[in-house]
Image (cartoon, grey):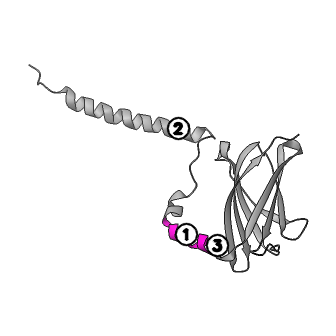
Amino acid sequence: MAAKGWYWPVAIVGLLVAGAAANIGFMIVANRDATFAVEPDYYRKAVDWDRTMAQEARNVELGWQVSTQLEPIDGGRARLVARVADRDGRPVTDAAVVVEAFPSARARDIASFTLAPAGPAGAYAATLAHARTGLWELRVRVTRGEEVFTRTISQDLAAAR
């Protein structure tokens, strides 16, 4: 005669295996589809939370402002122009402006580049290849000497007219 209750351990093992299989399936889908994205190096960013808050305080102390303009140009590209001004509205010149940019719809497609001085003082520009229309997140870092200013900006890229 078979022992009663043999099916409980089998059911528990079956549930554990099903949970693991579901997680593996989710991982495969998340890594295959560009619309799913995980913040790069998120653990380091969490550990450096105090440093991030200190940078926010430094941003307020500096009082700099960054405005961006993202416009479509031919061939599916876009031109990004950033203007940097100090607390009094004077252009910030001789700065290194680095931007990480990505469309919200394809957050995995992060482009990182340095903007070159352009046009009037305090203006910096670069061309983005493969720029899709829609909402973009721009993570701007301005460095001049020992001064560092950061800002995250959401910018809409409209279709070319």
- Viewed as shown, does residue 57 lie left or right of 110? left
- The span from disc 3 to disc 1 (Cα, nearest Å) is 11 Å
Residue at mark 2: 28
Highlighted range, magenta: 47-58
Residue at mark 1: 53
Residue at mark 3: 60
Label 2 sits on what residue type?
Ile
Q: Say which label, 1 or 2, has the lower sequence index.
A: 2
Q: Quadrant of the C terminus?
A: top right
Q: Residue at x 59, y 46 (%)?
A: 37
Q: Is residue 52 above or below residue 144?
A: above
Which quadrant of the structure image shows residue 152?
bottom right
- What x and y, as percent, mark residue 19? 37, 36
Mark 2: secondary structure: helix
- Viewed as shown, does residue 10 lie left or right of 113? left
The single residue placed furthest to the left in the displayed view is: 1
Magenta segment includes 57: yes
Q: Residue at x 72, y 73 (%)?
A: 143
Label 3 sits on what residue type?
Val
Mark 1: secondary structure: helix
Q: Residue at x 68, y 48 (%)?
A: 109
